[in-house]
Image (spheres, rainbow, N blue to C red):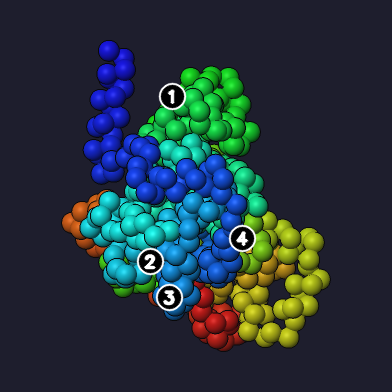
Amino acid sequence: MKRLVSATAALLCLIASGCAAPASTPATGDVANDVERALTSGTETFDHSEWDALLRDGTRDGLVDYDYMARNRVRIDAYVDRIAAVELGALERDELKALLINAYNVLTVVAILDNPDVRSIRDIDGVWSDLLWSVGGHELTLDNIEHNLLRPFFKDPRIHFAVNCASRSCAPLPTWAFNAPELEDQLEERARSFLRDPRNVSLDGDRLRVSQYFDWYGDDFVAEGWTPRAETIAEFIAIYADDEVRAAVRANPQVSLGFRDYDWSLNSTSVTEEVAATANSVAFAGVLRLPQEAAGGAAGWVERLRAWVSGFGAAGPLVYGLAYVLAVVLLAPASALTIGAGVAFGLGLGTLTVVLSATTGACLAFLIGRYLLRTRVERWLSGRAKLSAVDRAVETQGWRVVALTRLSPAFPFNVQNYFYGVTGVSFWHYAIASLVAMAPGTMLYVYIGVAGAEVAEAAGGAATWGQTALLIAGLAATFGVVVLITRVAKKELDKAVRDGGGAEADDVVPAAAQ
C-alpha cells in the first residue's frame, strides 16, 4: 500500500509539472551495436575544441547568449556535421560518453536557434521525442540520446547534471565542453555545482527541498549497478552538498524531500541583462516594455532571487540588510537593492528591511565621516560654497534640514551621510530624521519591485493580469503621493538654503535617486 501511495503521488506530481520522465531503456539495432562496440573495443578520440570555444564565449553564469550563438551558426553547424559523421563504434568509452553529452547540449542549442521566438523549449512541438538529428550516422531524438544511450549504457546519474534542456531549472551549461581525458573530474564538478546551489537543494525545516530531477529520475541515484550511487536520494545528495545539508542527512538519512517548482523559461542571458539594466529608478518602466519572452524569463529571475533569500530561512532579511548596509557605506547605488527587496520580501517586509538597513548604513557613514574621515571629508567639501550654505542651514534648523534633504531628490542619498557627519547636527536628530523621512521614497522603490515582479510572473503564467493591474494602479497612486511630498520638500529646502545664504537646492548637487 505504501508503495502504491508513493507511486500515485509521483504520478500526480509529474502530471502537475507537465513533464513525463522517460524510462532508462537501452536502444536496440545498429546504434546499440555501435555503442556496445565502443564500450568493449573503441580506441578513437574526438576533438571538441570548437564547441569548447563557443561555450566559453557564448555562456555566462550557466545561461546562453543565443544572439552570440546565432552569429556563430556556421561554426556550430560545422561541429554538428562532425558529430553526424563520426563512427560511434570506434570511439573509446569515455570519448563516446563525452560526445553524447556534448551532442545533446549542442543540438538543444540548435533547436532554440531554429525557433528564435520561443519563450520556452516546451513551445517547440516534439523537441525531445520527434525531432531527428544525425549522430554517428544514426537518426536520433534528444530522448534517444539521453534515455536510450547515455542512461542505460553508462549508468551514471551525474549525467543529469551534465545535459541541459535550455531551461532555467535545468543543470546549467558550463563554459567548457566535456572531453574524455577530464570527464570524471568534469562530472564531479557538475554534480557539486548543481547540488550546492540553494536553488536546487536547501534545507526547509526538517526536510530537503530539491530539484524535480530527484522526482523524475529518482531511481537513477539509488539503483544497483549505477555509479556513483547511495542507499537513499538524500544520501546521494549529501555526497556533493554543502556541510549543512550533509550534516542534516547524516543525522536523519530518511529525511523527507520536497520538490521545487520547475522553471521552464528559456535559459537566455538577454533576460538577465535586461533586468540588471533596469534595476534603477526607471526599472519598472523597463519591465513594462519587456517583450513577452523576456518577461517570461524575468519570472525565472524573480524565482531565483526569492530562492536565494529563502535559502537563508528566517535570516534572509538580515543577510539582505547587511548587504544593503555595506552598499550604503561604500557609496554604492542603493536603488537596485531597494527594488530587489520588493521582489524578495513584498511591500511590508521589504520596506521595513530597507528602511532599517538604509538608516543603519547612513548612521555608520555619519559616524565614519564625523570621527574617522573627518579631515578628508572636510577637505573634499572645502571650496564648495553651495554645500556650505546647506551646512549653515543645518546650524540654524538642524533635523528639519536633514528631513527635507531626505525627502527631496536634490541631494544624493549616500553623499548626505558623510556630509552630515561634518556638520553640527546631533547624531540622534540625524538618525531619527533619516529614519522617518526616508520611508516615502523607500516605499515607492519597494513597490516598484513588487509590481515589476508581478508583471514578470503574470507573463510567465504565475499571476493574473487583473492582479497586476491593481498593483500598477497602486504604484501610480504611491508615485503621485511621493512626487507631491518631494515637491513640497524641495520648496521648503530651497527656502532653508536661501535663509542660510546659499543658492536653491537644485543648484547644490545634481538630482539623484536613493
Q: Earlier in the sequence, mark 1 or mark 4?
A: 1
Residue 61, visible in the rendered structure: yes
Residue on which the image places disc 3: 73
Query: If the image is split into quadrants, where does the N terminus sit?
Result: top left
Task: Point out residue 170 in the picture as x, y percentages from the top left corner.
Answer: 42, 50
Residue closest to the far left: 466
Q: Which residue lies furthest to the top in this view?
A: 1
Q: Residue at x 73, y 64 (%)?
A: 369
Question: Front-most of 483 and 456?
Answer: 456
Q: Name the residue under label 1.
A: 256
Residue drawn at (37%, 49%) of the image: 30
Where residue 32 is drawn, which disc sits there?
A: none
Question: Mark 4 packing: few (<14 Cα in 10 Å), some, or many (20+)?
Answer: some
Query: Which callout, 2 or 1, points at the residue further toward the start of the chain?
Result: 2
Mark 3 crowdedness (10 Å alpha carbons): few <14, some 14-19, many ≥20: some
Residue 110: mark in rendering: 2
Q: In the rendering, at what x and y percent does residue 84 appear?
A: 42, 63
- In the rendered structure, which amino acid carries the disc numbered 4? Ala
In the rendered structure, which amino acid carries the disc numbered 2? Answer: Val
